Image: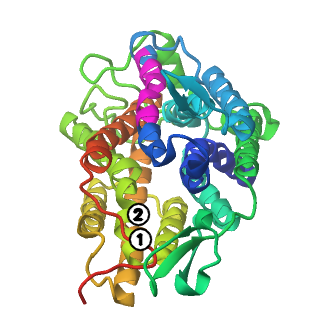
């Protein structure tokens, strides 16, 4: 039954961010059909940050009313809301209304906000729920969370989103202006291929994925085999009892939360090093862990994704699609590695964070140099930027798992704080990059077919 529980935890994790990740990869098909045009990514960035009201509410409830909020009820609510919102999105995303004298995609923006609330709130509810299962299943959940980015990307790749053919302008004089970007005679032009299936079908697929998540969650709660496993391993008792007794989340004042595992009778009981969780880590170590968590999520969820096209497109459309797809693959691969090579070392976490940040700095430098980054006319340049993206995501995804395992051992409240800091880091990253990219225009995009740079 361990295999079944692993699969269910993975499917449950897929529902965490599949909706918003799906929205992002579908932008090339959605944008031409709506009045907002390519301002939509900027609107989505703001909408996602506004949706952090969900995690804020959950975190404050755990802080001031510990034990009053059952995350299972919240999860049922947000997952059902995700199913309904993605289903409605399939039929309403093109509908517009006149607001303030201008035409806007009110249905698309409103449903995007609901989906953002669903996915942002999952960070502070899905992880604490995993406390109800033995520790090894947390890694399976992280694998699913990684797949929530990979699966929509692969489906969009099959759909043919953003696929471009570079054709000679003079040889294609009869190609319609709708599908081509025309240049001067003799130049290559980008001819965007028609998608293999519509955006409506894609959004219905996202709705099915949310239904799968809901089904997995139901089975994790009610399947007898999973229930027996929970009874066999007394993981939740102490943490839940303490929260319902009224012990709040506090780094300063609360009593140490006991580790939700069987207490060993061997050896003397160590004095807690802090009042957080089980007291395994000192205050300085906890601050360091949470700072790293916020930093890593800021880089992987906001800062670098906002410049991905600038760092890759100058090397060609193939390099861009390869980088996005392989980076999406690297996330669940890192979680698979962590499943077989678990680690709680703060030294390793530091080394990997510095390494991943270094690769991220190279990506940012190439984006800043766009449309003429290093080695733009060489295959080595394209290979290097793809490899850099893969290593960047691989290392920092492994760091996320290390921190998740560390905080899981500290108890239920630690995982609530983990989800809150994930959202805080992502929000700070998005807020820092939004003006640089969308307002001041510090980054210049490259032409997928013609990058005119000195050799």
The percent coordinates of residue 202 (x first, y second) are 71, 51
Picture layout, residue 397 above or below residue 114: below
Q: Is residue 55 left or right of residue 10?
A: left
Q: Is residue 74 magenta?
A: no
Picture layout, residue 454 above or below residue 311: below
Please give the range of residues in magenta. Answer: 46-60
User: SS of the residue at dot 2?
Assistant: helix
How far apart are the two marked residues, 2 and 1, measured between alpha carbons?
5 Å
Looking at the rendered image, the quarter that the C terminus falls into is bottom left
Do the residues bearing badges 2 and 1 touch, measured as CB atoms within 8 Å? yes
At 47% from the left and 49% from the top, the residue drawn is 38
Q: Is residue 277 something one can see in this rendering?
A: yes
Q: Is residue 53 magenta?
A: yes
Mark 2, residues whose alpha carbon is within 10 Å: few (<14), some, or many (≥20)? many
Which mark is on residue 313? 1
The percent coordinates of residue 402 (x first, y second) are 40, 52
The percent coordinates of residue 143 (x first, y second) are 57, 55
Quadrant of the image occupied by residue 86: top right
Front residue of 425 and 373: 373
At 47% from the left and 39% from the top, the residue drawn is 44
Quadrant of the image occupied by residue 364: bottom left
User: SS of the residue at dot 1?
Assistant: helix
The percent coordinates of residue 49 (x first, y second) are 41, 32
Which mark is on residue 449? none
Picture layout, residue 17 above or below residue 129: below
At 67% from the left and 27% from the top, the residue drawn is 81
Quadrant of the image occupied by residue 222: top right
Reading the image, the residue beneath label 2 is 309
Front residue of 403 and 255: 403
């Amino acid at each position: 039954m361990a295999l079944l529980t692993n699969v269910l935890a993975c499917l449950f994790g897929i529902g965490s961010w599949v909706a918003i990740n799906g929205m992002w990869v579908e932008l090339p098909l959605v944008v031409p059909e709506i009045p907002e045009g390519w301002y939509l990514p900027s609107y989505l960035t703001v909408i996602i940050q506004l949706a952090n009201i969900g995690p804020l509410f959950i975190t404050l409830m755990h802080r001031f009313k510990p034990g009053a909020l059952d995350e299972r009820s919240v999860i049922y609510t947000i997952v059902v809301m995700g199913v309904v919102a993605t289903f409605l999105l399939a039929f309403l995303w093109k509908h517009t209304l006149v607001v303030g004298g201008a035409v806007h995609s009110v249905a698309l923006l409103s449903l995007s906000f609901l989906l953002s609330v669903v996915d942002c709130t999952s960070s502070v509810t899905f992880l604490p729920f995993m406390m109800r299962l033995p520790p090894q299943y947390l890694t399976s959940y992280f694998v699913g969370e990684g797949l929530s980015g990979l699966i929509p990307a692969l489906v969009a790749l099959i759909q043919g989103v953003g696929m471009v053919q570079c054709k000679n302008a003079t040889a294609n004089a009869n190609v319609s202006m709708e599908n081509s970007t025309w240049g001067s005679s003799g130049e290559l032009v980008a001819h965007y291929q028609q998608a293999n299936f519509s955006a409506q079908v894609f959004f219905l697929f996202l709705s099915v994925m949310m239904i799968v998540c809901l089904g997995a969650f139901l089975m994790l709660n009610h399947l007898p085999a999973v229930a027996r496993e929970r009874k066999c391993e007394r993981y939740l008792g102490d943490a839940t009892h303490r929260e319902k007794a009224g012990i709040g989340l506090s780094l300063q004042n609360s009593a140490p939360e006991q580790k939700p595992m069987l207490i060993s009778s061997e050896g003397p009981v160590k004095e807690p090093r802090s009042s957080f969780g089980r007291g395994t880590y000192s205050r300085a170590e906890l601050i360091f862990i949470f700072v790293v968590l916020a930093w890593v999520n800021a880089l992987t969820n906001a800062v670098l994704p906002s410049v991905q096209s600038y760092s890759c497109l100058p090397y060609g459309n193939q390099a861009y699609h390869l980088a996005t797809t392989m980076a999406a693959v690297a996330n669940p691969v890192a979680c698979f590695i962590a499943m077989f090579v678990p680690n709680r070392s703060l030294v390793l976490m530091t080394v990997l964070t510095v390494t991943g940040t270094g690769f991220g700095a190279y990506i940012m430098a190439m984006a800043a140099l766009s449309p003429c980054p290093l080695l733009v006319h060489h295959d080595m340049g394209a290979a290097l930027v793809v490899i850099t993206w893969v290593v960047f995501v691989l290392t920092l995804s492994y760091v996320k798992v290390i921190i998740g395992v560390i905080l899981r051992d500290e108890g239920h409240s630690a995982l609530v704080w983990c989800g809150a800091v994930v959202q805080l880091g992502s929000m700070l990253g998005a807020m820092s990059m939004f003006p640089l990219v969308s307002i001041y225009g510090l980054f210049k995009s490259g032409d997928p077919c013609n990058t005119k740079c000195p050799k």
